[in-house]
Amino acid sequence: MNIVVCLKQVPGTTEVKIDPQTNSLIRQGIENIINPFDTYALEEGVRLTEKHGGKVTVLSMGPPQAEAALREAISLGADEAVLLSDRAFAVADTWATANTLSIAIQRLGEYDLIICGRQTIDGDTGQVGPEMAEMLNIPFVAYVSKIEEIKDKYLRASRMVEEGHEVLETTLPAVITVAKEINVPRLPSLRGIMKSKSAAVTTWTNKELKIDPATVGLAGSSTQVIKVFFPQRVSSGEILTGDAAAQVDKLIDKLKSANLI
């Protein structure tokens, strides 16, 4: 079973700065980590290959320093790693990102399952997984909390919905995004750490992928950030005191005086 796990390196802090020219995060000088939701995707991929055989290839798009995240993924059980790194790929929205990842996955060759985390903690959109499925013309299942059965060209999975869980069946290959309820990610083993230090991480630029430059990075983004800013803190306000009934009366009086009711 050939499994592709897509992961992203993200800032490991909420203290981030914005480049006023590009309206993108300034990542230099910031500790970076594997997107936490992607660790569940990686763990599930490793578990599946431990049970059914095959290999896990981790794939990431980012600057050269994202290689560290891929080496960490190898220490956690991944077999191969590919980094998509080219200035032409920078400042991509989810559509351009999914386009680049999809073309890279096709270059990898035969695959059975693509696993992603449900979303990233920096973008928080959850759009790349379903966009890749659309581009690759394969089925997609979101918020998978348990893989019930997988064999040959068949997958049965339980996914989280507002009312609880529902079980879906689909053919393979497919793309799934997983919820954190699916497993508990392992810690790296000593053998894994040693392997990650000497493992070869393949880097592909657009020279290898040969994607139309108009469809990647900022040029290929369907959406663009016009401005990013931090809202000003508002210190005014009042905490109402007294019991619940007294607070309600005070709130109604204030709303009336402000002509809001």
Image: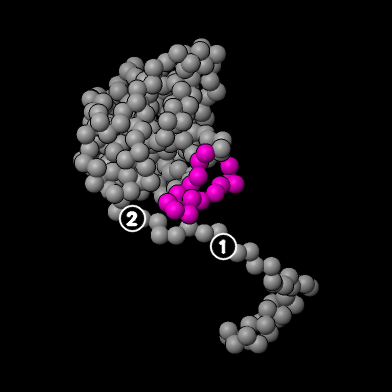
Does dot 1 land on a helix, a strand or a loop?
loop
Q: Is residue 235 above or below residue 165?
A: below
**Span shown in magenta:** 13-28
Q: State if disc 1 and disc 2 touch (CB < 8 Å).
A: no
Number of residues whose C-alpha sits closer than 10 Å to that of mark 2, classed few (under 14), some (14–19) or many (20 or more): few
Q: Is residue 89 left or right of residue 235?
A: left
Residue beneath disc 2:
223
Q: Residue at x 29, y 38 (%)?
A: 100
Whether residue 149 appears in magenta in the rendering, the answer is: no
The answer, for residue 204, to whether it is visible in the render is yes
Q: Is residue 25 above or below residue 86?
A: below
Residue beneath disc 1:
231
Taking the view exactly as shown, the residue that stands out farthest to the front is 21
Whether residue 19 appears in magenta in the rendering, the answer is: yes
Q: Is residue 238 left or right of residue 211?
A: right
Question: The disc labelled 1 sits on which kind of residue?
Answer: Pro
Q: Main secondary structure of the magenta part?
A: loop
Instruction: Looking at the picture, tell me which residue is in the foreground, 27 or 45.
Output: 27
Q: Residue at x 68, y 78 (%)?
A: 251
Q: Is residue 129 above or below residue 44?
A: below
Residue 177 % position (x, y): 38, 39
Question: The disc labelled 2 sits on which kind of residue?
Answer: Thr
Q: Which mark is residue 126?
A: none
Task: Tell me where residue 260 sits by quadrant.
Answer: bottom right
Q: Is residue 114 left or right of residue 236?
A: left
Q: What colour-coding does the image apply?
A: one colour
Residue 1 % position (x, y): 30, 21
Q: Is residue 178 above or below residue 25?
A: above
Residue 220 % position (x, y): 28, 48
The answer, for residue 168, to whether it is visible in the render is no
Q: Could you tell me how far apart the alpha carbons at marks 2 and 1 are, in whole angstroms? A: 22 Å
